[in-house]
Each structure stands twice: as structure tokens, then as C-alpha cells.
Amino acid sequence: MPRNATNISRRHVLLSLSALGSVAFCASSGRAAADDDKTPASIQFALDRAIDAIAAPFVLADARGLYRAENLNVTTTVAAGSKEAIARVASGASDMALADLNALIRYRGESDAATVKAVFVLLNVAPYAIVARKSRGVISLGSLEGKVLGVADRDLAIRLWPALAKRNNIKLAAVKQEKISAAVREPMLSAGQVDAVTGFSYLSAVNLRDRGVPADDLAVFRFAEFGSAAYGLALIVNPKFAAARPEAVKAFIRAVTAGTQLAIRDPAMAITDVMTQMESGSRELELARLRTAIADNILTDDVRRDGLGGIDAARFEASLIEIAEDFTFKKRPSAADIFDDSFLPGSVGRKIN
């Protein structure tokens, strides 16, 4: 279970922030930290899965004193996937959570959904991918026809597979889907029991290399490279909490923005902190996972241009069209229904340095 914020010295906080260079805005613009005597704002935050490399921005915000610098007392818990994380925020059990933005869109597409919104996008590009073995005859996306695609329980990538197949002229019926447990996804592909699997590029592909599958035998078809506009993981907030504590939400986002900057600047340092929060795991594997996520999903062309955290309205609309291939909206949401940019730091504070 993740730790609460640790007690560290003010000097340690300043040293951590100085590593960000110009992103020291988090200390200077952090109104929540202006008064040392002010009672810290408490936030109940939920991750969508157990801590691994992708949680680095949040681990760093804790371990490097970024929450404390914003006068926040953050308690972190773990949900069993995005669906549960969204349910926790909708019910008020959690004030904020990390969840898949496309899962949130489907949730808000129901007529009776709570008005949960995203306020910061961590993964500018969704990590959805099909990972295949070239030795099983899968050398292109089109060569999946006639092959067996393993689909794990609660897999998110498969929900956008119909749109991806349509865009790339692949016959859905020609690709056999086999339901499998998430626990055996990589072992089954490694053993040749399926020809390909759906999943996240920084999970399945990295895990397979760790299992000894040669890198040159892996074909990783990232949905984004085949026309998908989907965003990935985002911070979501309970509407009542956002209305009652807007400055706390802003402070949390500033801390996470600074944590993300730190992870981008020094992935090895970030993984050192992450490993202290994991019960088991390989440092080498988690470092590879973080570097893959930074390169493919966080530090994108859009982020280099516009900064961390935001969305593009036209791209969002394109993602809705993809989702509609596999989901019937009872109430089609707009970008404003799903994303509230009023809590984001200014553009200068979100720029990559």
C-alpha cells in the first residue's frame, strides 16, 4: 500500500524543486503553501492499479515533498482498475483518482452518470497496443487476419480495436479473439498459445522482453501509430470536492505536474523512489517501463508544443468517434462534459524544460 507523505526538511524540498529549473513555479505559485500555519488540505487519492513505474509522478510528489510544498496531506489508495477508480470518485469515497480517460467517457455516456470530470491528462497518448510474435507470422497489422488474438479480462485496448480495424481495412471476423486471464497474457504469447495480445505497450511488450522473448521477434502495433486519437490516463475529480476545494485541486495538479517533470528529467532517480513503494519487482524492468511510457505516451509532439495536462478539442471529438464503434452513447458527451481545464497551471508552468 502506498505511503502517506513523508516528513522531510525544507532544504530537501527546495533541492528537489531546483532540479526542475524553471518549473520552480510550483513553489512560487503554490498559494496553498503560502502560509506555513495553514492546516494542510486533505485529499483522498486513488491509483487505478498497484504502484509501478507509471505512478512515478505521484510517488515523486510524495517522496520529494511536492505535496507538502503545496500544503497538501495526500492519502493514496489503490483501485482495481479504471472502472473502480471512477466509481470511487463518483461516490465520494475518493476525492481524486487516476483513470483511463476513455473509460470515463463511456461512464459519462450513460444518462444517469455522476458529473465526474478529468482535470489533467497524464498520458497524452493512450498506451493501447497489440503485441505479437513475428515468429507466429504476425509481421503487420493486416497479418492478424487468420490469427488468434488473446484478450485479457477488463482489457481496455480491445474496446478501440473495432475502430482501429475499420480504419486500417482489417476484417474483424477474420481475427479470432480468445478470452484469457490477465495473469497469463504474456506467458501464453511467450509460449505460442496465442499469436498476439491486446494490452498496454509499456506493460505487455516490456514484460515479454523480460520473459526472454527476443526484441526482434516482437511486433508492437501501437494504436496511435495507426490513426487512433485516444488519450490515456488522466486525473479525475469528484464534482462536489472540486466545487468546495478548487485551490486544493489546483495545488494537487501543480505537485503532479512537477513530479512528472522530475520523472522526465531523471527516470533513474524516479524509479529509485518507485522501488521503495513496491513490494517486489525489477528495477531494470520498471526503468524500461517508465522510459517507454515517457517516450511514447507522455512526452509527445502535442506535449512538447502545448505542455503537460491538456487536451485538444478536435482530437477529443475524433476519439469519441472511435469509442462509438464499440459503445452506444445514451448521452454523447462534449469535451466540456469530460474535461475541465480551469484547474491547470498556466501554459508556462506546464511546458517541458
Image (cartoon, rainbow, N blue to C red):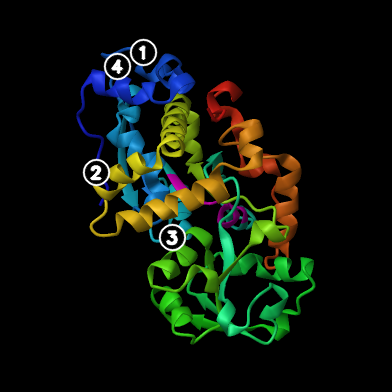
Residue 41 in view: no
Give the labeled residue for mark 3: 81
Q: Quadrant of residue 160?
A: bottom right
Task: Report the Cα–Cα distance between label 3 and label 4.
Answer: 35 Å
Q: Which amino acid is tagged 4?
A: Lys
Q: Check whether the beta carbons of the residues at disc 2 and disc 1 lie within 8 A of each other.
A: no
Give the labeled residue for mark 2: 3
Q: Nearer the viewer, mark 2 or mark 3?
A: 2
Q: Per the image, is 266 magenta?
A: no
Residue drawn at point x = 65 percent, y = 75 percent: 139
Position in image of residue 134 (x %, y %): 59, 77
Indicate left or right for 181 with 112 as reference.
left
Give the labeled residue for mark 1: 34
Give the labeled residue for mark 4: 38
Q: Nearer the viewer, mark 4 or mark 1?
A: 1
Q: Which mark is residue 234?
A: none
Task: Report the Cα–Cα distance between label 1 and label 3.
Answer: 36 Å
Task: Report the Cα–Cα distance between label 4 and label 1.
Answer: 8 Å
Q: Which amino acid is tagged 2?
A: Arg
